Amino acid sequence: MKNVLIADDDPVFLRLLVNSLKEYQHEFKVLTAKDGKEAMFVLSNEPISLLITDIIMPEVDGLELLAYVSENHSATSCYAMTAYGTPEIKKQIPRDILKFLNKPFPMDEIGPEILKTLKKDTPSGLIFGISVTSFLLMLELEKKTCLFEVTFPNETKGLVYFKKGVIQNAVYEGLKGEEAIIAIIVQGKGKFRFKTLTEIKIPMLITKDLTQLITEAKSQSLNNSINNEENDTPDNDGPENKLNLSGIFHKIDDGQRGKIIVMNISRIGIQFKLEVPHSFHKDAKLILEFTLDDKLKSEVSKEVVVQSETDLCINAEFSIKNHYDKLGPYLLFNNLSNQELF
């Protein structure tokens, strides 16, 4: 049975939340902690599948707890509870492991959400954790004055200085200021640490707000993806380039067939471009079929719908366990946008 840990310093709220989850006692076990320090102790002694934490707590607050989880228990899914989550903030938070719960929330809604999270089939080896964007937004939300440090999977590190929730400066791989913070956001996910400071004594090199910086980072990420697609020289540094994919499309209404070209591939997704006749139109239904030519031999098909007459790229995300076990982490189609995929 999976364990769910709830950390909140309000004993009345905590008791009400635990009582509302009693009907799920055969689905998961609920553990509690009165603050972040106690939650860290539980995490170090029990396998926790989901952490639900309040942001504002004594001794060790929710942000410190989430940073600890990111560094030491990155396979643990996380929800953050706050009374200050605005719709604008929620809109900016990417669809990663982290979920915001605005207090007060209907107690009867949390159980189904927990079940949904716990029942997600996640392939072994998939990178977990909270995105840099999500954590930066929480630091802004809680008006933190701190030094935020993030270490990425490639062992590079970024530093971000906050003063009362406003980014003052950032440093990353020789970059400073806005260039550095955009590069940090583009990196995606990493392991976090932050140190609360009483004051910031560094020059303020960043004048744009976080929302603007996130938008610019998304644009840069998309441009990087397009440039990679146009680069004919394969990058052989990562395991994602060891695949040989080939495929065809089959137009449902008239039986036209053609080739599938691989445009881009990464650890989390793949983008196909279709060699199609000009007669294709928006809303045309296609069946994509392709073979993964690697150690595992498999054929997979998926019905998709053309989104526009000019954009005949189909995107895919790899996440469902039965596809992962069958093929490696490469085969569930979701028709995601470029910004969501790369």
Image (tube, grey):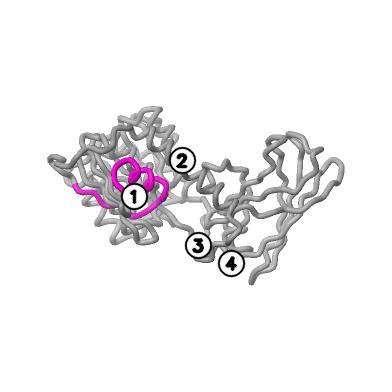
Q: Label 1's element?
A: strand
Label 3 or label 2, whichever lies nearer to me, is: 2
Report the amino acid beneath label 4.
Lys
Where in the figure is residue 178, as x and y percent of width and height? Answer: 33, 40
Please provide the residue range marked out in magenta: 175-195
Name the one closer to the observer, 191 or 312.
312
Residue 164 figure quarter: top left
Q: Residue at x 58, y 50 (%)?
A: 317
Mark 1 vs 2, N-terminal side:
1
Report the amino acid beneath label 1.
Leu
Residue that label 2 marks: 218
Mark 4 vs 2, N-terminal side:
2
Report the amino acid beneath label 3.
Ser
Label 1 or label 3, whichever lies nearer to me, is: 3
Mark 4 vs 3, N-terminal side:
3
Label 1 or label 4, whichever lies nearer to me, is: 4
Report the amino acid beneath label 2.
Lys
Q: Residue at x 73, y 50 (%)?
A: 288
